[in-house]
Image: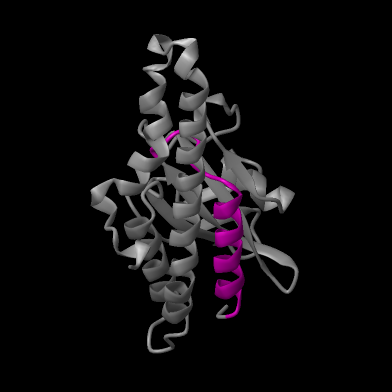
Amino acid sequence: MKIISHPKNTKFTLYIKQLPVYFSFYNFFLTKQYHSQYLSFLNILNIFAGKFVGMQLEELKSKVTNILKNKDQSVTKRLHSVCQLLRDHVEYYDWVGFYFRNGNKEELKLRTYAGEKTDHEIIPFGKGICGQVAISNENFIVPDVQAQDNYIACSFTVKSEIVIPLFKNGKNIGQIDIDSETSDPFTEKDERFLEFINQEVAKIL
């Protein structure tokens, strides 16, 4: 069975990841007799959720590679297809976009995306999460956007964000930016997965 076959609108991944939250409401009512069993059960759920997401991301890699190898389409079209693929198949990827340095200017320009329309097509270096990554050259995971002082609000529904820089010949030329309407969903698995995507993208630039 292919785990990736679960469509985004089933809410399967999100349900699994949030099961510990649902069960925590019962914590108050548990007696000491069952408390240890309860904690063990939550631990199993967390492990299962992590493994499920990891398998899902791994299975997407070949699809991403196939999209990027299609030379019959423009680079922008291929990047857009990757954005759409990720948004459609990863439950907590609600907005996916690629930003690139705008010529010699100290700013990022949005090239393509999948998700709600955004007004942030140009982002100055140093401003917001994307602008900070353009300078730091490092991954940036934001579990809670409301806790960030230097954050550009895109939508009141966005709760977290991850930005991974894209390098070409050792130079930071852009980034993949993902917004999520789920609180704190991103893990190291997402970092490694998105780094892989950026490495593949760099090959066609």
Nearest the camera: 102 or 202? Answer: 202
| Residue most extreme to the right | 170
Question: In the image, is 119 to the left or to the right of 199?
Answer: left
Report whether residue 188 is seen.
yes
Q: Nearer the viewer, residue 161 or 7?
A: 7
Most distant residue in the left direction: 9
Of the 4 image quadrants, the one containing the N terminus is bottom left
Horizontal and vertical percent position of residue 153: 45, 34
Judge from the rendering whether residue 173 lies leftward or rightward of residue 176; answer left or right: right
The quadrant of the image that shows the C terminus is bottom right
Q: Which residue is most to the front? A: 33
Which residue occupies 41% across, 13% down? 30
Residue at x 44% of width, y 10% of height: 31
Q: In this view, does 115 lie above or below 83?
A: above
> In terms of secondary structure, what is the magenta stretch mainly?
helix
Magenta stretch bounds: 181-203
Q: In this view, does 174 lie above or below 188?
A: below
> Is residue 187 in the magenta section?
yes
